[in-house]
Amino acid sequence: MEIPSRSLATEAVHAGREDLAALGLHAAPLDLSTTYPSYDSRAEAARIDEFAATGARLQGPPVYARLDNPTVARFEQGLARLEGTESAVAFASGMAALSAVLLVRVSMGLRHVVAVRPLYGCSDHLLDTGLLGTEVTWTDPAGVADAIRPDTGLVMVETPANPTLAELNLRAVAHSCGEVPLLADNTFATPVLQRPAAEGARLVLHSATKYLGGHGDVMGGVVACDEEFARKLRQIRFATGGVLHPLAGYLLLRGLATLPVRVRAQSATAAELATRLAADPRVAKVHYPKIGGAMVAFEVHGDPHEVTAGVRLITPAVSLGSVDTLIQHPGSISHRIVDPVDRFSGGIGDKLLRMSVGLEDVDDLWADLDAALAGSATTPPDGERRAPAPAGR
Ligand code: MET
């Protein structure tokens, strides 16, 4: 179906749902079938041959749910529209999505990856251990071009980065990549604040568990990209089985509709909390991205573990992007699996806390943070106050 160019807010509500009215439906249908009837085995053989050869979505019903699912496909179409890409391929989690990208490149004999720290802890771990047969070179954004080798299959960045909110210039990094695909993890910014494909990233990764779902009740991952790469991802997804459950696809499609209003409202509260934290003598440093967003990181003078133990309205829990506010200590949870030396050199110190700001009232959130900070026995070394530092690399 030819779709005219529409604003992000309109796409969020309508993309992936264009055919519903013609079907006589309002809400998207949820197809939980694992298999599909066919009385024509010869036709099925031809369709399977074609999928195996090309990775193009099957015409007609799926053969089996590991090849394709119509509800998941609606979410994929919606996300692709929001990210401004031809296609998107969804997976059981963000890590399954990243794994599929790496496997595509390894299967082409391109096993070297260039990556910029910090990344989400498990992304770092997957690359650093080479569990999938990859080899990583860690560098800074300025070193990307020099780190690329003939067998480099991927450059990976995350901006704003988990958990320090460090930002980089995607357009400049994409330029340094030349012909090598750039993968940008856009989980924190979402397409509401940043569209990496427009800056030159060939692959846009999301942990859909976070802002795309938005309610802390669905796990998924997705890669938005051109159709050529999407075909390879579908082949890997079929071969390795990391599919997104259709109910998760349904919930993620529903989540997309409110993504722009949630992200903008949560970002406004996060910016205000960042300002209040920066003016607080118990707080040593605040990290808040220039691009905005609903994530705030801050370092305390006192014991960060007392802050997570002391919150009552805010939930002390890993993950992010939900309608309620969460706080966690990256050194203990989200980035625990990263080698301590690499963790510290990536700016993830023991005093750092990461907060995902929800839709609660800003004064109620501040009252809870204020009480938790009071319990963390904090004393500024010199009483010096600073504005929130733009998160830099
Ligand atoms: C298993 S820990 C991390 C979950 C999530 N990716 C986060 O950064 O919070």
Image: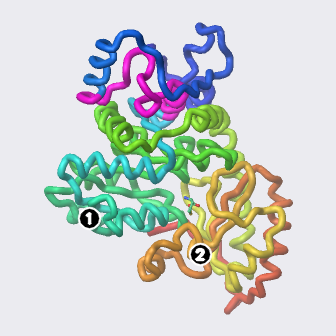
Disc 2 secondary structure class: loop
Disc 1 secondary structure class: strand
In this rendering, does residue 59 appear at all?
Answer: yes
Residue 35's place in the image compared with 265, above or below, is: above
- Image quadrant in which you'd find residue 334: bottom right
**Residue 54 is inside the magenta segment:** yes
Q: Name the spot of residue 285 as percent of width and height, x first.
A: 62, 76
What amino acid is found at the position of numbered circle 1 in the picture? Glu
What amino acid is found at the position of numbered circle 2 in the picture? Ser
Residue ID for mark 2? 332
Residue ID for mark 1? 135
If you read the primary sequence from the N terminus, does the residue marked by circle 2 or circle 1 appear first?
1
Q: Which residues lie in the magenta part?
A: 52-79
> From the viewer's perspective, is 196 left or right of 330?
left
Quarter of the image where the C terminus is located:
bottom left
> Most extreme residue toward the left, as rendered?
150
In this rendering, does residue 388 appear at all?
Answer: no
Q: CA distance from mark 2 to mark 1?
A: 26 Å
> From the viewer's perspective, is 296 left or right of 87?
right
- Image quadrant in which you'd find residue 11: top right
Could you classify mark 2 by the number of other residues whose Cα lies within 10 Å: few (under 14), some (14-19), or many (20 or more)? Answer: few
